[in-house]
Amino acid sequence: MKPPIRIAVTGAAGQIGYSLLFRIAAGDMLGNDQPVFLQLLDIPRLLPSLKGVMMELEDCAFPLLAGVIATDDPNTAFRDISIAMLVGARPRGKGMERKDLLEANGAIFTTQGRALDEVARRDVKVLIVGNPANTNAYIAMKNAPGLKPENFSAMMRLDHNRALSQIAAKVGQPVSSIRKVIIWGNHSATQYPDLNHAETDGNKISLLINDPAWIEDYFIPTVQKRGAVVIEARGSSSAASAANAAINHVRDWVLGTRENDWISMGIPSDGSYGIPEGVIYGYPVTCRDGVYRIVPDLEISEFSQAKMQATYGELVEERDSVKHLLG
Ligand SMILES: NC(=O)C1=CN([C@@H]2O[C@H](COP(=O)(O)OP(=O)(O)OC[C@H]3O[C@@H](n4cnc5c(N)ncnc54)[C@H](O)[C@@H]3O)[C@@H](O)[C@H]2O)C=CC1
Ligand SMILES: O=C([O-])CC(=O)C(=O)O
């Protein structure tokens, strides 16, 4: 048996938490030979409810679940962890944009960035889910100077999965056959879902579809606005699909992406594709041996370039509005 990996999940008493914890404990994230130790964080008022979740985890008798703790102290939750899934934050309601949450949520990530810096393993992989995810990830990263910037990521994977499903339905092919989709930029309505490089069984999706109006007027806005449409329908924001995306993100980062494909991750920009350093930006990446690498040398059309710069502009605005939180 491998030694257990310690994983922190924040907002563990929330709706994403309820979909996430059981799948991690079942082995969906790190594999069915990898024991896990869960370190759950929520606010003091939610600890009684979190106790109930812990009872349910216990009642599943998961063979891979080596232990669980629950706490309201980030320094306890993050001690010796290899993976941090920072979900805990307020969700938006109907009619709000995700950046409207910056004021309520931004400060959470200063405290948690500092705690990661103090007590997490130096190779900790951090995924920020709480919105606005990219700028919250930037805040956490800036408050953890002792950790490498490449340890921090924001979730673009739900957008990526939404794009895969829309394309699969359009071309009438199984979702598993769709490869090389990209979500550039911010996890917000300015994100740029790009299918110019996408393929199914080696065929270019854009040629198969051969309908620029469908791409511009249906595909791109549908993916951009899907979160809001789910909120309208459900009355609360996506939870099971968000938990699924978080599992996909961490699994691929740790265990590697599949051959001849890539995923979208929000990561520190490094100048690639004309995006200057200083934001957490959605890029296409491949992962191997626990390390991600931006897919190089993609041809970018003028249309794409403009969309990529627009979503970058929004990230700069968000960053400038939280200067006081950047450590
Ligand atoms: N990046 C993405 O693709 C997605 C992000 N989200 C975001 O994920 C976040 C969580 O969503 P839900 O689980 O639906 O919300 P929820 O309201 O059901 O749960 C949030 C939990 O976080 C806890 N929390 C609040 N402040 C905390 C703190 N300082 N430390 C630890 N826990 C704290 C709350 O007490 C609550 O239990 C929201 O910000 C939402 O917008 C949701 C879907 C997709
Ligand atoms: O839309 C929201 O507020 C929740 C979210 O991030 C998503 O579903 O993509």
Image (cartoon, helix red, strand yellow):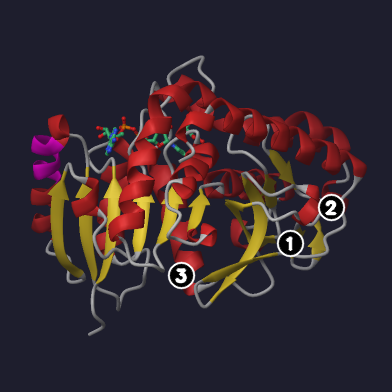
Q: Residue at x 67, y 67 (%)?
A: 261
Residue displayed at 25% across by 62% down: 25
Q: Which labelled disc corresponds to residue 298?
A: none
Disc 2 to disc 1, how far (Cα)?
Answer: 9 Å
The quadrant of the picture occupied by the C terminus is: top left
Q: Residue at x 29, y 50 (%)?
A: 9
In the picture of the structure, the residue carrying the numbered disc 2 is 208
Quarter in which the N terminus is drawn? bottom left
Where residue 64 appears, as percent x and y from the top left, is 21, 71
Residue drawn at point x = 51 percent, y = 78 percent: 289
Asked whether, in this view, residue 37 is left or right of residue 287, the answer is left
Amino acid at circle 1: Thr
What's the residue type where badge 3 is placed?
Val
The secondary element bearing badge 2 is classed as helix
**Do labels 2 and 1 touch, CB within 8 Å?**
yes
Mark 2: amino acid: Leu
Give the mark toward the camera: 1 or 3: 3
Given contact means CB atoms under 8 Å apart, are the residues at marks 2 and 3 in contact?
no
Q: Does label 2 point to a residue whose CB lies under 8 Å from ligand 2?
A: no
**Above or below: residue 238 compared with residue 202:** above
Compared with 241, 189 (above or below) is above
220 relative position to 282: left or right = right
- Tag of residue 200: 1
Q: Nearer the viewer, residue 299 or 320?
A: 320
Q: Residue 48 magenta-drawn?
A: yes
Which sits earlier in the primary sequence, circle 1 or circle 3? 1
Q: Nearer the viewer, residue 293 or 262?
A: 293
Dot 2 surroundings within 10 Å: few (below 14), some, or many (20 or more)?
Answer: few
How far is the residue under mark 1 from the one under mark 3? 25 Å
Q: Which residue is mark 3?
A: 254
The earlier-in-sequence mark between 2 and 1 is 1
